[in-house]
Image (cartoon, rainbow, N blue to C red):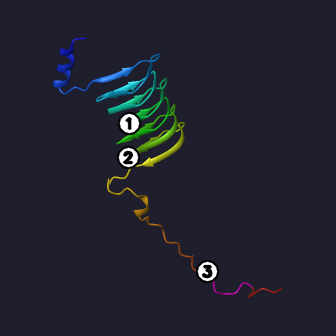
Amino acid sequence: MDTRNVTDEISMGGVLHNALAFGTTVKGDVTTDGDFRLDGRIEGTISCGGKIVIGPTAQVEGDIISVNAEILGSVVGSITTSEVLVLKPTAVIKGIITTKALVVEPSAKFSGTCNMQLSDPDADDLQDIELALPTITPAPSVSSVPISEGYTF
């Protein structure tokens, strides 16, 4: 491989994109600083410093940690994103989601728990949040006249 091309692309501000093709299986951890697209299978942890796309044929048995993620395939494990996680209609997730923002499109399947990160990193406890609940007041009486008045029984 000509490392000069890689160095030139990085020096020009380009971001390298990584991909693992359909039919390829990796048993072990994958770490990348750039974006990553998976159409194969990974058994292990994926750490991505950019956006990860789990294609419709992709399978992950392990954890995903990234800035942003778009899931079209299947994941069994935890998904942690520091920004946005998008579950597309073909996504099948079984595990724990931790993200700042979650988009679940119709037909996406998710079984597990989801933790939405708060904007304030110091606000670790949801018990400290005060919710503004609406005040319910009874409707005013329509009439103070007894129902039996004016009727003969």
Question: Quadrant location of the N terminus?
Answer: top left
Q: Which residue is at the far front?
A: 28
Residue that badge 1 annotates: 65
Depth check: give the residue in front, 5 or 121. 121
Q: Quadrant of residue 109?
A: top right
Residue under the image location 32 percent in, 53 percent down: 121
Q: Is residue 99 left or right of residue 4?
A: right
Secondary structure state at the residue bearing disc 3: loop
**What residue span does the magenta drawing correspond to?**
142-147
Residue 126: horizontal and vertical position, in percent? Answer: 42, 58
Mark 2 → mark 3, Cα distance in angstroms: 48 Å
Q: Nearer the viewer, mark 1 or mark 2?
A: 1
Dot 2 or dot 3: first in sequence order is 2
Residue type of the residue flagged with mark 3: Val
Residue 64: horizontal and vertical position, in percent? Answer: 41, 34
Residue that badge 3 annotates: 142
Question: Quadrant location of the C terminus?
Answer: bottom right
Residue type of the residue flagged with mark 1: Ile
Q: Which residue is at the far top?
A: 1
Dot 1 or dot 2: first in sequence order is 1
